[in-house]
Amino acid sequence: MNLNAGPEYIEFRKNVLSFLEENKHMAGKARTPVRPSNEELKWQKKLIDNGYAARTIPKEYGGYGAQLDVLKSRIIAEEFSKANIPMGMANQGISMLVPTLLELGSDDQKNDWISKTISGEVIWCQGYSEPGSGSDLASLQTKAIVDGDDFVINGQKIWTSGAQMSDMMFCLVRTEPDAPKHRGISYVLIDMNSPGIEVRPLMTMTGHAEFNEVFFTDVRVPKNQIVGKRGEGWYVANATLTHERGMLGDPNQSATRLNEIIELMQQETINGEKLINNPVHLDRLMRLQARVLSMSFNSLRLLTASHKKLDAKMAKLIVKLNGCQLNHDLAGFAIDLLGELGTIYGKSNHDHGSGKWQWKYMFDLGLIIGGGTAQIQKNIISETGLGMPREPKSVINGKK
Amino acid sequence: MEFALSEEQGILSENIKKMFDDNISIDNIRDHSKGDKSLRKNIRESIIDMGLPGLMIPEEYGGSGLGVLEASLVAEQIGSHAVPSPWIGNSIMAPTAILFEKDNHLAEKWLPLIVSGEITVCISLSEVIGKRADLGLIVSEDKVSGINIFGIDGELNPAIIITAVKNNLILIETDNNGVEINEIPTIDSTRPVVEIIFDSSNYTIIPGGKEAIQKTIDVGRIGFAGDLLGASQNMLDKAVEYSLERKQFERVIGSFQAVKHMCAEMAAALEPCRSLMWYAAYSQDFISDEANLLACHAKAHLSEVAQDIARTSTQVFGGMGFTDLLGMHYWFKRIGLSRQILGGPERVRKEAALIQGFEI
């Protein structure tokens, strides 16, 4: 254990701080889920040019080309967060497709897509889940049949966030219907403007359509838009699924949320008593704070493991399960703090900011379910982490 | 920055684990709880042979000069093996308290004797942590009288007692000084706590005032967090192991998701506690402005997680968990005692809130 930063990192932090000081006027507000504005595209370019976005993407593909150094990445994240300045873009194309292409894409695919994706010019959505294939993703049925130089795609995807504003989709389709389910899947890149694609917004319990359904009817995709080999799409996708789960349990988000709650408790008064002075509320706050701190320290442990290229095992397997549950519990606490006012969801003169917390409380329940349900996470923790056996497959259609 | 145990810290932990693995079994823990004190004697000798009692004591007094993190790694192994031997009071809290004596008079006199294992020290701070109306100490200029309860590490005829009165730590020699020590029967038979009766006993003030009291409590809480971590990890590991042997409905019970998910939930709750304990222990020596708060959080949070694991893992064992045959109840009870000593979770969380300036 040594939590002192070396001189190189102290210097690096200084550079980040002075960059932020000089350039913060250019940074916009945190992004809404629409296509990036010109202002945002300029900010993204500025960040890439200075090594604060697309930091480890090679220069030939439009990145900054630095060696991977997780400590420096963390310093950037910390200082941007403290200054409340948006980081570089973190859409699904950048965080999931680009690492996949770097590892498994053809030279043409790398040249065609990486630079345009990290700059924000091309926006991607992810086509994995289907109505009949949620936790059992590998059972997916969207078909791709070869016809001349194209695949012809028919089927349906669900939980596709951002589909209506995306240019492209990275998508899992079944190309070998007779192969075992994990070996019959291919990973293809689909132009969302192709004829035969229909995007329907999917209204959720939050009252908003954060996701979509996407329908494919005889959609033609050139055969060279496959990433990796035919039938190996499952393995191509798995590289990025691990990445998604890391993103979903980010402890910085929990820490930020905890600070917002403390601020709320210092401002709000009920029956003449400040919430921060109520011992029962404080006890619950302390319990949550201990969980937030534990997950932050767990992330320091992961950071060191990743820096030393070691497998963090259990410490890594629990992040999605714990992080999503913690965020949901924090939102629930904020609502309870507001009491009756906590139920206001919409424009009202009596609003004390409950809408944001109610939205998070519901949306985070979605995140507990999405990206590998809590139950699937517990299977992974018990099987991979604790060495317990897989469930035998003896129950079909609800009958023995 | 490196958030991981160093190679030396890993080796220390491994060596201690091996020593306990070799010397402690469920059978001799059971014998110990029935009154046979040979395990207590043998383990104490092994701990002295390994040079552990002075782990945190500076080299100038013959100790190893290591920190609270190393000491809590030992506490973790002690909790994991339900070791009936002094540690948190004698080797973590006592040296921390005595080192507040800046002119080294007390340190020179007592620390080398702790290092060599010639003496043990009992710590009793219930007077400041959870004072009861019917108990307490009365002090005159040079004498102390009254009753203290829940002294830690008082089972081996300690040569000195450290307690607190009037915002100061005081040190009382036990030899011919009107001190009577009696074990208090608690749920936890692996680790005695004691009642101490002072009758016009002479005392010496340890300087440092409230700060010395607080620091001594903080490092003690870290020690108990380590003990709780080890005890919980052992209960979880043993539950998983048992679930892979025990068969019902022609399957090992560990293949049922009901059981797997109980184990996964325990692991998910416990693993971040390891990072919390490391950070909190490290902060005692290296990050002074966070040390007090993190000692509270480590103790309170581990107490909650450990209690859940004690209950849930016992359920994984089914009926066997409830019997004395497997002996898992020794850890269940050890966790029950650790939870309350030096402050139960609600009291400790109240302190955590006050430390941050949240007024109650």
Image (tube, coloured by chain):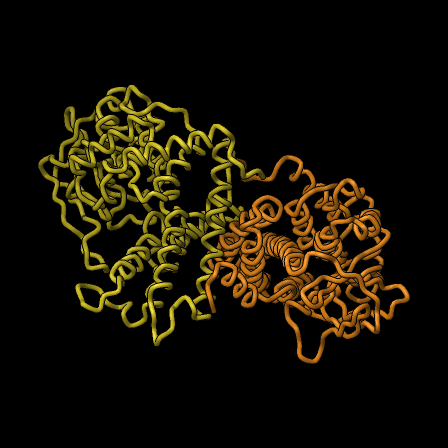
Chain colours: A yellow, B orange
Closest to the observer: A238 or A54? A54
Tell whether B16 sits left or right of A339.
right
Residue A12 at x, y percent in the picture: 42, 30
Q: In this view, does B10 lie above or below A282?
A: above
Residue that appears at 37% across and 63% down: A266
Front residue of B176 and A303? B176
- Determine if residue B296 is in view: yes
Number of marks = 0
Q: Where is residue A26 in the image (x, y as percent from the top left)?
A: 23, 36
x and y percent of residue B198 in the render? 81, 72
Q: Which residue is drawn at 49% across and 50% down?
A: A382
Q: Which of B333 and A200 is in front in this view?
A: B333
Classify residue A194 as left or right of residue B167.
left
Image quadrant in which you'd find residue A97: top left
State the residue lying farthest toward the right: B176
**A179 or B353: which is nearer to us?**
B353
Judged from this view, the residue extending furthest toward the bottom is B134
Residue B190 makes an appearance in the image? no
Residue at coordinates 67% horizontally, 36% vertically from top-left? B8
Q: Indicate the position of residue A317 as horizontal and vertical percent values.
A: 46, 45
The image quarter containing residue B191 is: bottom right
- Which residue lies most toward the front here? B141
Q: Residue at x 28, y 56 (%)?
A: A363
Looking at the image, residue A321 lies above or below residue A7: below
